[in-house]
Image (cartoon, grey):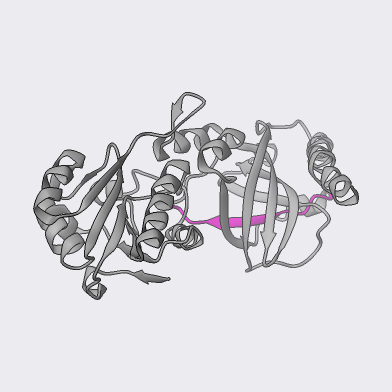
Amino acid sequence: MATIKSINEIDNINMSVITIGNFDGLHKGHQVLIKKAVEYGMKNNIKSVAFTFENHPGNYFVPNSIKNIISNEEKINRLKNLGIDLIVSIPFDEYMTKISPQEFVEDILVNKLGVEKIIVGYDFTFARNKEGNTDLLKILSHKYKYKLDVVKPIKINGMRVSSTYIRSLVTQGSVCDVKNYLGYNYEIEGIVIHSKKLGRTIGFPTANIEVDKDMIIPKNGIYATKVHIEDKMYYGATNIGYNPTVNGEKLSIETNILEFNEDIYGKVIKVEFLERIRDEKKFSSLDELKSQLEKDTNHVFKKYICKTIEYMIK
């Protein structure tokens, strides 16, 4: 399972089935494309290839305009787990903005990757000024002798699965709904950093993480979460916001990890969002804040830890 990060690194492949897209989030719609490519490759004994970009094309034209659902590293890991043979993950750069659709097909897909079949979504566009689309791919298929599979939109609860819609759910804090479309819980990771350590003084120590600025962050509020530290998993109550009770000025993402008491400063942890419990609120005193935090953590403990213990006993 190889990953290529430059067009020039491609060592001419005899035959392949290729699916192309930005694949941000690798949601259920993307997963259909990948599955089709993997199955076709295995059936016909040819390489399955995922052609994608390490940066969102939209951000090339308008920097920081689109936040990522998953990091590029996580996208590659998930592609590998889905069984793809070869991942081409290249920068979307000036070259990609100037190449014509026919040059893209002939120079890259045909000559370098030996395409035998292309699998794309119904709204797929590519190359210079998005001049390429599924209609053009169909026309070019006759010249270059490849098959084309255009996959219809995947709908769940009447909504088309798309990265744009998933981003809107995340920003609304609808993390329960996000899982329906991603196929997994939304998650972010970051390095545990030092902060004011206020939580420790009232009996609720938190792990404050520094997250990649390119990642989309859920709506401010309190969330029930899973916390992955190295190879272990814990439950927690995560606060996203500005700590208004103590007049905080900087957005923080901090988690009270239940049944955990270790020094993890400097470590990378992953926070997986299960549900949004409530809005962030400014309390009249630290005692009132402490009382609410007890309710939040009790909610997580009873709903998730107790149920997990009951399941294990059964």
Q: Which residues are magenta?
A: 203-213
Which residue is more in the foreground, 262 or 205?
A: 262
Which residue is more in the foreground, 20 or 255?
A: 20
Rendered location of residue 294, percent (x, y): 84, 40
Which residue is more in the foreground, 255 or 166?
A: 166
Side of 114 where 52 appears, left or right: right
Does the magenta-highlighted stretch encompass residue 24? Answer: no
Q: Residue sitting at 61 percent across and 49 percent down?
A: 253
**Whether residue 177 is situated above or below residue 261 in the rendered picture:** above
Res 133 → quadrant: top left
Query: Can residue 100 be spotted in the picture?
Result: no
Rendered location of residue 36, percent (x, y): 39, 50
> Which residue is situated farthest in the top direction here?
158
Does the magenta-highlighted stretch encompass residue 212? Answer: yes
Side of 226 where 27 appears, left or right: left
Res 18 → quadrant: bottom left
Rendered location of residue 279, percent (x, y): 65, 31
Q: Residue sitting at 17 percent across and 50 percent down?
A: 127
Q: Residue sitting at 34 percent across and 35 percent down?
A: 152
- Count how many numbered circles sit on residues in the image: 0
Which residue is more in the foreground, 279 or 284?
A: 279
Side of 297 where 228 appears, left or right: left
Position of the N terminus by quadrant: bottom left
Rendered location of residue 206, percent (x, y): 72, 53
> Which residue is situated farthest in the right direction here?
313
Query: Can residue 260 be spotted in the picture?
Result: yes
